[in-house]
Image (cartoon, grey):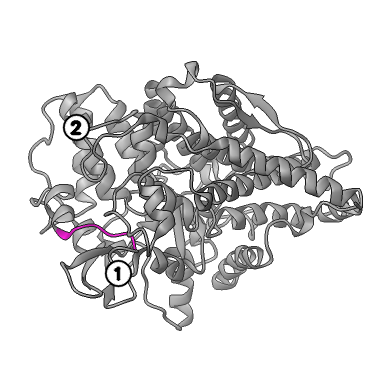
Amino acid sequence: MNYNKIITGVLSLCLAASVTGCSDWLDVKQDTVVEEKDQFATYSGFQDALTDCYASLASSSLYGGVLTMGLPDVLANIYQEPNRERATSNYYLYHHDYSQQSLKNSFDNIYTELYRNIVQCNIIIRHTNDVPSVLTEEQRELIAGEAHAVKALCHFEILRLFGPVPTEGTTSDIKLYYTDVSDITTRPVECDYTMFVDRIRAEFNEARTLLAGVDPVLKYNFDELNKFGTDGFEYVTLKDEKYTVLRQFRLNYWAVRALQARMELYVGNKAEAGKIAREILAAKTAEGKPLVELSTLKDMSDACLCSPSEGLFLLSVPGVVSTADGYFGFKSTTVDGASINTLPEETLKDVIFDDKLVGEDKRYLEGWKVVAQTGGGAKVPVLLKYFSEEEKDAEVTLKMQTKLQVVPVMRLSELYLMLMETSTDLAEVNRLYKEYMLARNVNLQADAFTTLDAVAAALPREYMREFYGEGIIFYFYKRRAMEKDFLYGMKDFNKEAYVLPFADAQKRAEEIKKAEEAKKNGK
C-alpha cells in the first residue's frame, strides 16, 4: 500500500477544490436540479461536495487568512496602530470605525461566504436522506455528521462576529439568521440570541451523534490514522482509505466536541465547557492510547511553528506562506511596521512574555524574529507561525502538506486553557499549567497559582502568548465583555464595538438572493 500516494491524493482533493471554487455545482440556474442529481449520484460525489466546503473554509477570505491572521486580531488591537494612508482599512478596523465602506464590504463578504457554506451543507444533508440512497448507513452518518458540523461552525462564526456580547445576549434586540433551507433564495429564520445559540447547540449535537458510531478517530488516534499503510501500522484498518485518513483535516468527532466546548464557554456555560474539555484531554483510543498530545519541541525543531501536531481541526492551505507574508512580512529583511501586523519589541518581551520566560519559552524564541523597519526606526518582531522554507524534495513536500501548509482552527492548547479557566480545583489547574508550559520548554518546579483569581488574571497573557495570528483573542475579550485592563493595545473600549454591523451584511445577502432568483428565472 503506497502511503504517500494515499495522503497526496487526499490533500490533492482539497487543493483542487480550492482552485476550482466551492460553488461551481451550486450555481443557481435552470438546470440546478440536474446538476444536483449528478453530483449526488455516487458516494464520491458527496465527498467532493463536502471537500468543497472545507476548501471554502480554508480560503483567504475565511480561516485561511481574514478570520485568523487578519480581522479579529486587528479588532483586538494586539498589534501597533496601522498607518491611515498605508493600511487604511486596518486603521479604521483598529479604531472600530465601522462606517467605512471598505469595512462594510469586508463584513458583507465574510457573511456571504459563511452563508454560502451553510446552504451548501444543507444541500448535502438533504441528499443524504434521499430514498433510495447511494450511501450505506455508515457513509450517510459520516457525510451528514461532517456537514452538520460545518454548518454549526459557520453559524457559530456568525454569532461571534455579528451577535451581541454574550453577557447581554438575552436582553439584546439583535436578530440573527439561521437557515436549514437548501437554496440561497429562501429567507433564513430570524432568531433572537437564545434561539440562535440553541440551534447551534442542536446542530453540533446532531453532528456528534452521527459521527459517534462511524468516525475512526474513536478507535485510532490521529498519529495512527496519519501513518495508515506504513510499516508498523498494519493493524490500522479502514473501510474508506481515501476519506478517513488525516481526520484532523476534517471535522471529526473530537473536533466537534472541542468546538462545542469553545461555544459553551463563549456563551457563558462554563460547567459544560469544562466538562467537555476534560473529556477530550482524557480521551483514549480503543487500545488506551492518548488521542493527541500537546505539541512539543519536535514541532519547533522541525520548523512546524503553528503546532500542527496538537491540531484537532486543521485546514489545508497550500498558499499559506504567501498569504501570511502579506499580513506579517516575514519574508523580508526589513518591514513597514505601519502597514503589517507587528508590535513593539519591548511589548512582546517585557509585557506579553513577562521578560522571565524569554530565555526558555519556545513560542518567543522560535515563534518571532526581530527585523529592521523600512526607513529606520526601532526594530520590530514579526510572527513566524506560518513561515516555512520552500523545499522541493518529495518527502519534505509531504511534510509541508500535512504540517506546514496548514492553518489551525482548533488546537489542544485551547482545551488546556479552557479547563484551567473553568476548573474550581486549584491543584488540577496547576498540574495542567505545568504540563502545558513544559511543552513550551518551560519547566515549572513550583505551582504557578495560589488562588483561582490569580488563574483568571493570568489567562489574558497566556492567550496572547499562544494565539497570535489565529483570530482567537478578540473573542476572548468579547465573551468577557472587557472594557478596560487590556494587557496591550486597547485602553478603554466601548462594548458596542464588539458587534460588527450585521445589517449591512444581511442587506447584501438579500441582494444576492434577489439577483440569483432573477438569474434563475431568466431575467
Task: Relative to 15, say whether 126 is above or below.
Answer: above
Amino acid at dot 2: Ala
The reply to whether the magenta stretch includes residue 344 is yes
Residue 26 x, y percent position in the rendering: 77, 53
Viewer-proximal residue among 109 and 86: 86
Residue 149 vertical position relative to residue 170 in the rendered view, above or below: below
Q: Residue at x 88, y 38 (%)?
A: 131
Instruction: Give me the disc on residue 21.
Output: none
Left or right placement of residue 110 versus residue 474 in this view: right
User: Is 236 on the left or on the right of 342, as rendered?
Assistant: right
| Nearer to the camera, 47 or 179 | 179
Which of the numbered marks, if any, corresponds to residue 457?
Answer: 2
Judge left or right: residue 455 versus residue 138: left
Q: Quadrant of the N terminus?
A: bottom right
Q: Residues within 10 Å of mark 1 (few under 14, many from 20)?
A: many
Q: CA distance from mark 1 to mark 2?
A: 33 Å
Magenta residues, start to end = 340-345
269 displayed left or right of 225: left
User: Magenta span: helix, strand or loop, mainly?
Assistant: loop
Q: Answer whether labels 1 and 2 touch (C-beta < 8 Å).
A: no
| Amino acid at circle 1 | Asp
Q: Residue at x 45, y 38 (%)?
A: 258
Q: Nearest the camera: 227 or 128?
A: 128
Residue holding disc 1: 336
